[in-house]
Structure formats: structure tokens, C-alpha cells
Amino acid sequence: MSAKINSAPIIYETQVSCREITPRDYDDNFTEEIDSSEIYDLIRNITDPEHPLTLEQLNVTQLKHVQVDSENSYILIEFTPTIPHCSMATLIGLCIRVCLLRSLPPRYKIDVKVRPGTHNSEDAINKQLNDKERVAAALENKNLLEVVDQCLSTVFV
């Protein structure tokens, strides 16, 4: 087994879902706008590729870094790698993107970005994560797709 990039990450306390489920959520005749709490609930339980911990437990994702513009069908997710040279940052961003692509209607434009100043290669990572062709090519790699699916296994149960 290879050495972990961040062998001793800080583990943060998780919160109970910040979104209240109501009977309307189960009513197919009612359309409710997607909000940042709903998006956060989708991505917070993605498992880190290196540790058996969620992105929320590692403080990689936070509700305050999720922006939703329902009127323009736009979502921006900013995430914080656990260390500034994290080689898993692109994979984490890819997992977030795939989770949202699998969960949301196709009308949404999704941007996934490293929070400014939190990674040594944030510009390159952001470019890769938000280029449709690069994302599609990455997902054609069977081994990479298996890792993404493993990270999302706790989300889509």
C-alpha cells in the first residue's frame, strides 16, 4: 500500500442534514427550486479517495461554499483540499462534479473549483474540472471511474 499524502488529517464534527424534509418533497406534482442546502446534502457524504472519511468530516466541503442561482440554473461549488499540495484535489473535484451530474437535471451548469489560495495548483485543477472534454475523457478511464464510484458509494445508496 502506498503512503498517504495526508496521513493524519483533522477530522471535523458533522452536522445533521441542514435541510428539513417535508411531505412536499415526495409530491411529484410540486416543483421546488434547488437550494444550496440540498446541493450540500448531496456532496457532503462523498468519501475521500484516500481516507474512509467524508468530505464534510475533512472540512473539504462546507455549506457556505455552495452557491445556487436557480433562476439561471447555475451552481458553484468551491472546495478546500486538506493540504495545499494535495494530489487528490482533482479527483475530489471530479467526484463532486459526477455526483451533481448524476443527481441534477441537465439544465444546470455546474462549476467545481478549488477555493482561492488553498492549493498550489488551483488554476490548473479548476481548468481541468470545468472542461467538459477533459471530464468526459477522465470518465472513460475504467480505473478512474471505479475510484469515483467508490467515493460516491455512500451517496447513492
Image (cartoon, rainbow, N blue to C red):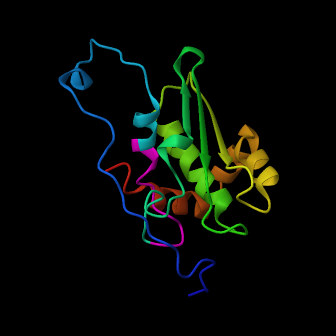
Q: Position of residue 8 (x, y in %)?
A: 53, 81
| Residue drawn where x is 57% and y is 25% of the image | 108
- Across and down, in percent, residue 39 comes to 45, 37
Side (left or right) of 136 relative to 70? right
Q: Position of residue 92 (x, y in %)?
A: 59, 57
For the image, the number of numbered tags is: 0
125 or 37, nearer to the observer: 37
What is the quadrant of the N terminus in the image?
bottom right
In-image side of 90 versus 34 (left or right): right
Residue at 27% over, 12% down: 29
Residue name at image x 49 percent, y 26 percent: 105
Front-most of 137 and 89?
A: 89
Residue 46 within the magenta-colored segment of the rendering: yes
Q: Judge from the rendering whether residue 132 lies leftward or rightward of residue 31; answer left or right.
A: right
> Which residue is found at the position 72% from the left and 38% from the top?
132
Q: Is residue 60 above or below residue 88?
A: above
- Residue 138 belongs to the span the image colors magenta: no
Looking at this view, name the residue that lies furthest to the top. 29
Specify the segment rendered in magenta. Answer: 41-51
Q: What is the chief secondary structure element of the magenta stretch? A: loop
The location of residue 123, given as percent across then percent down, is 81, 50
Which quadrant holds residue 41? Answer: top left
